Image: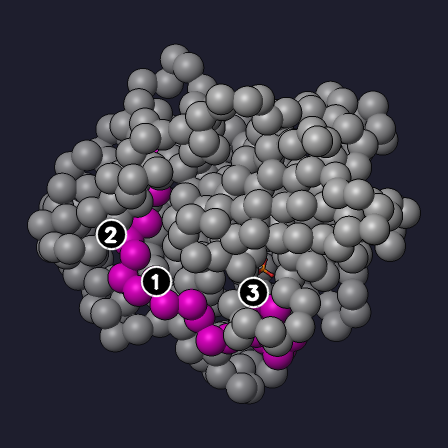
Amino acid sequence: MSKTYRASAPSNIALIKYWGKAKDATQTPCNDSLSMTLDIARTCTTARLLPPAAQDHIAYQGEAQSLGSSRPAGSGPGKAEQHLARLRQMLGYSAPLAITTSNSFPADCGIASSASGLAALTIAALAAWTDSSSFEGLEQHGYSRSRIADFARLGSGSAGRSLYGGFVRWQATDNSIQQLWDQDHWDLADLIVVLDATPKTTSSSIGHHTADTSPLFLPRQAGLGQRTEAVCQALLTRDLQRLGDLIEDEALEMHAVMMSQTPPARYLLGRTSHFLGWLRNQRRLGHLPAWFTLDAGPNPHVLCAQGDASSVMARLQQELPGVRIIRDQVGSGPTLHLEQQDQPDCFQHQDLAPGRETRNHHPGAALRSGAHSQ
Ligand code: PMV
């Protein structure tokens, strides 16, 4: 039996969003984006070589997920199949692969499962094809982290940012992706409020291509450079109030473009708008030191200082009884291992960096059972 390689890649939440890209296949975004890599919201993907006559086999396990490409069964190759075909064509590998993939969070509902999914798939497939059980091993085969990020980006733009921990910038001019600061730069928490886990009906790939039909698209592009630099400055100086105000404006502006493009991409629900208004009001009253951002979905990410996360979480749970809230934080990026016999399952095995007390809030067993969420 051939060896099995296991990649675990985090999702990321964009603070400055990528919405709109070139119409060709280069996946070149219209603007720079900035993201915070997450720690708990991850995809775990294994890859193993199959005999030459076999066909690729992809098993989706755990929380329903299709690598960010919700589609009816039997409707042709999904994002994962297309991505494997693309990698083969670019790199010349022919060996078929057995893939398993699972998420620690609900997919296709705006928590960037295509970012973690396509990043993990890229790493695991390259590991199996090159017999590499570490990033150093991949590097020896010519796959530096930036090259892997570039391949992942072709599967889903935001996946390139998930190759790095901490705070990451994807530059539109040359498509380069760089870590600005690592995970120890700033101890922020991200409480992901799962208001609705139903898979979205407009995929972000489709939405990107018609973003420029919105009358708000060009005004947004004109102001983004300034906002991006302001977000960088707020990150540099760890100014949460400034960062929070900027990311709320940014999230609402992206959704205004989405709603006004043709055809419109409506991701927000009445419940989302109600929640955002409530959060802002609580903050104004001095009860909640927390700010929201949103991806292409109805589920708000609530950012706050790690020191305030327990009390903010308690307040959210009180306001939203029965709603699942995933307590996440800044993460250190993807991992790669050779799978051993008797190894604990992926989310238990996940490399929770030692010495960071805050990570102990999330033992792997809780992740598997869903006990981390309410
Ligand atoms: O990576 P894609 O093609 O699924 O697009 C993601 C776009 C947003 O999540 C809405 C914003 C971003 O920069 O992550």
**Is residue 287 part of the magenta span, yes or no?**
no
Label 3: how many residues lie within 10 Å, few (<14), some (14-19) or many (20+)?
many
| Residue 100 left/right relative to 200 | right
**Is residue 193 part of the magenta span, yes or no?**
yes
Distance, label 3 to label 2, CA atoms, is 23 Å
Identify the secondary structure beneath mark 3: loop
Q: Is residue 162 in view from this perspective? A: no
Q: Quadrant of residue 237?
A: top left
Marks 3 and 2 in Cβ contact (< 8 Å): no
Marks 2 and 1 in Cβ contact (< 8 Å): yes
Q: Position of residue 333 (x, y in %)?
A: 55, 32
Which residue, given by chain and number where applicable, does mark 3 sit on? 69
Identify the secondary structure beneath mark 2: strand
Q: Amino acid at mark 1?
A: Ala
| Residue 234 left/right relative to 127 | left
Q: Compared to 25, does 291 lie above or below?
A: above
The residue lying toward the viewer, choosing from 86 and 264, is: 86
Q: Position of residue 313 (x, y in %)?
A: 19, 42
Distance, label 3 to label 1, CA atoms, is 14 Å
- Report the residue at 30% width, 64% height from top: 196
Which residue, given by chain and number where applicable, does mark 2 sit on? 324
